[in-house]
Amino acid sequence: MNLQAGDKVLRSRVVLPVVALYNAWQAEGLPELHRALYTQIDFDSTAIADGDLNGALALFQSGWTALERLGLARGRSVHPDLGRSLRLIAQAGTEYWAFFNHGDEEARSALVAVSGDDAIRVVLTADKHFVVEPVRADEAPQSLVAVLPQVGPGQGPLISLPADALQPKARHAREEEGGFLEQNRYATTPQDLQKAALRKLLAEKRLGGGQLYAARRNHLGRKVRCPKPLTFFDTIGGRYLQYQVSSNGLPWNTVQPADFGTMTARLGMLPATIPNV
């Protein structure tokens, strides 16, 4: 891969061992890692506890070796294009990220950071590498949803209920004393039918799922996260999206079949839910 100094950010896709990105991040003097970039690194903790640092030092060196092999570092100096890409991630004006899993795999993460006309996507792979690449800033939500496990949309109508709809409620004495017709009337209201449909859906076997978040910087430059993430879950019947909206000042939960368009549209709305504080 040939990179030239002077570019604002990376121009093409690179695959880095986790420790390589961590090395570069530290070398650039950047603040704490984004939470979507945290993952466990395999090393002998017992040896370190016993004072043997050889394994940890070898792991550290392997990260720099990988960067040099890719032309992204010389000695302990990070290539400017990679450095600017990491700085964009650290200082992004808007960002979208996700934690997700599918089947028996470990939970993974992905992040899309946007600054002006530039955007960088970072995806954690199952074999503990980061895939780092530029994406279109105006398609940031699509870029994040595109890396989620591919699952078709579920079936059925949209379900929208008060957030506490599935919580048990005490019955009034008059309801307890009512006859069959009165009890049946309460059991077949539109809301109760939606409750039954939601309970059935939530009881289906899960194949995977995750949560999607957004954050942006306020007028003081402080990063503020969306109040409520989007949650998706995959069943044998397909993928469903759950999100919360406010109706008359009360929280309502909505669950609906989720295709690519539904996921990206809802994710794109998240920054608008972030308060101006």
Image: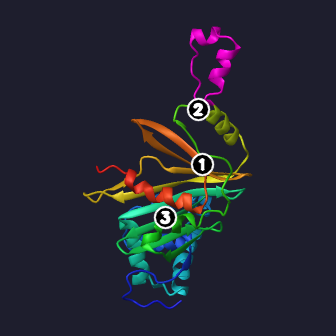
- Residues in magenta? 167-192
Work out how far the residue at label 3 is from the one at label 2, CA to CA, in angstroms: 32 Å
Secondary structure found at label 3: helix
Please, what is the three-letter code of the amino acid marked with disc 2?
A: Gln
Work out how far the residue at label 3 is from the one at label 1, CA to CA, in angstroms: 18 Å
Nearer mark to the viewer, of 3 and 1: 1
Work out how far the residue at label 1 is from the one at label 2, CA to CA, in angstroms: 15 Å
The residue at the point 64 percent across, 39 percent down is 198
- Judge whether residue 123 can be spotted in this image: yes
Q: Nearer the viewer, residue 185 or 117?
A: 185
Q: Report the disc number at residue 191.
A: 2
Tag 3 residue = 141
Relative height, residue 92 to residue 191 (above, below): below
Q: Report the disc number at residue 48.
A: none
Q: Based on the picture, tell me whether residue 231 belongs to the magenta stretch.
A: no
Badge 3: how crowded within 10 Å, few (<14), some, or many (20+)? many
Mark 3 in CB contact with mark 1 (< 8 angstroms): no
Please, what is the three-letter code of the amino acid marked with disc 3?
A: Pro
Tag 1 residue = 256
User: Residue 160 lies in what quarter of the image?
Assistant: top right
The residue at the point 46 percent across, 89 percent down is 3
Badge 2: how crowded within 10 Å, few (<14), some, or many (20+)? some
The residue at the point 61 percent across, 28 percent down is 189
Secondary structure found at label 1: strand
Relative height, residue 41 to residue 228 (above, below): below
